[in-house]
Amino acid sequence: MTSPARTLLAATLLLSSMLLTPAAPAQTGAWTDGEFLVLASVAGQTSIVRVVPETGASAVLVVPQAIAGGISVLAFDPFRGGLLANASFAPDNPSLHRLWLIAHDGSHVALPGLTGALRALCSAGDGRIFFMHNTGLGPKVIEYLDASDQLRTLKAADGVTPFTIEVEHLLYHAPTNALIGSSTSYLSTTDCSSAGSSLYRIPLSADGLKVDGTVSCAPSSSAVNTEDIMSLDHLPDGRVLVTLATGSPFSGDRLIALDPATMAVSGWAHPSQADINGGAWSARLHRAAVHAITNSTSELRTFAAGVSGLGALLPTSIALLGGSGYSPAQLFFRLDANGPACHGLLIRYGEGLAGKGGLAPQLDASGCPDIGHVFTLSISAGLGGAGGVLLVGLAPGSAPFKGGTLLVGSLMAQIPLTLPGAPGVAGAGALSLPAVLASPVLAGVDIHLQAAFADAAAVHGVSLSNGLRLQGD
């Protein structure tokens, strides 16, 4: 690709406009960033269910023999490319729990050396997996697997003494290089509040081996002692979304925001439901989603900032039977494919149109699309030497085009490009394109891409790639 074309691509990706509803990928197949994962009872068996945020389309990923405890026992690990689950699988005894790495097709392998009930599973995205053993009341060490699967213990500031604390949930906050933790008053002896729940910031050293500085603690916004923190997740403004459940209906906020730098807590939204089993921010929906019991029914509900009431229903194609009741047993999780240092989205969607050799060009991306980050767009499996265009729009599309489907709407640009590779050879055309979202006005804006190439073997002389949705924060 010529230098002017690269400049045009970068400029095109700076376009600003409205937020639009994206096309939804399937709930099976490869992992997609931002999809939901729910622990549910399906046909009487505890199952891990995948849910498409935009449509509620649901599919059972895997059915373990048992899930250990339920307190933050799932977490996606982008470094290893799979879902972490503290569970039991055959042929083990059902009471033998391990830490498993589950692939998108449900296949699973046990990570070495970890048995027993765990809590506070947390991936840092760089190979570290933090956790604690779920062994009842009292301070406990924070352990982690490193990128080489070596088991380590987080040290106190002296670098020698094991650091201890009592939390049920952990979240790695990359901007401050800290672990954010939470504890419930009646389940913890280290709370900083005599009522309600506590939130902690545990600063880490640059090498991640020890605590570096003072551990901060702040009470949640509610003063009631019948309250549990159910989950922690990242908000796009750098704060942490904290989801609460309570035994006192209509008292206090259910979704609050924590500023990890100042430890200031403020209300974010006020669901009416008291029994909430986890929540997360969804960049795909531009809203928060929670697993809640509404009128005795387990379901997913979504909320914008400042909203009160029952929220908007997200119907799932699988009934989400069962609820955790009033306890910190989390049932709802968000898949973070890029890791906690990146909040942007890169999601394939739709089907391309094949050309020569029965091959459809493949449009992909890698890296972090957040504002100011350089990431890479890639095209593969195209016709060698073929000329074409990269279509850039601000909405998904579904219009018939050249025997296939035009997957980009609100078209803003058509960027000319030519595939390298042996001319006329099927699948030989491939290239990589650097791109950047340089302007802050693009934060949260959905951009949709599709490539089209001249190919005489295609049904109407044009081959089409899949669609690609990207969003930076």
Image (cartoon, helix red, strand yellow):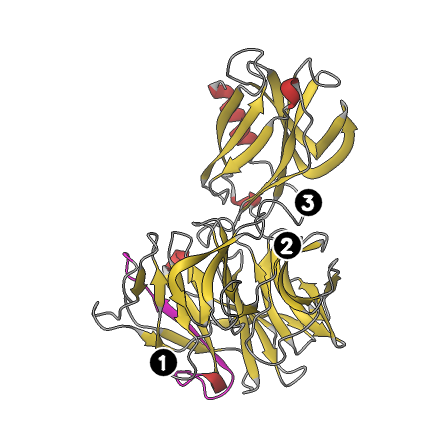
Q: Which residue is mark 2?
A: 286
Total numbered circles: 3
The residues tagged by marks 3 and 1 sit, at their Cα atoms, a distance apart of 45 Å
Comparing labels 3 and 1, the label whose residue is closer to the camera: 1
Visible residue check, residue 371: yes
Residue 297: within the magenta?
no
Residue at (51% x, 12% y) in the render: 422
Q: Are marks 1 and 2 in contact (CB under 8 Å)?
A: no
**The residue under label 2 is which amino acid type?**
His
Q: Which quadrant holds residue 278?
A: bottom right
**The residue under label 3 is which amino acid type?**
Pro
The residues tagged by marks 3 and 2 sit, at their Cα atoms, a distance apart of 11 Å
Residue 173: horizontal and vertical position, in percent? Answer: 42, 60
Q: Which residue is mark 1?
A: 139
**The residue under label 1 is which amino acid type?**
Pro
Badge 1 or badge 2: first in the primary sequence:
1
**Residue 410 vs residue 156, the one in the foreground:** 156
Badge 3 or badge 2: first in the primary sequence:
3
Badge 3 or badge 1: first in the primary sequence:
3
Q: Which residue is mark 3?
A: 22
Residue at (69% x, 26% y) in the render: 353
Q: Which quadrant holds residue 374?
A: top left
Residue 203: within the magenta?
yes
Mark 3 Cα shell of 10 Å, populated few (<14), some (14-19), many (≥20): some
Q: Which residues are magenta?
A: 188-207
Mark 1 Cα shell of 10 Å, populated few (<14), some (14-19), many (≥20): some
Residue 268: horizontal and vertical position, in percent? Answer: 59, 68
Label 1's element?
loop
Residue at (49% x, 44% y) in the render: 371
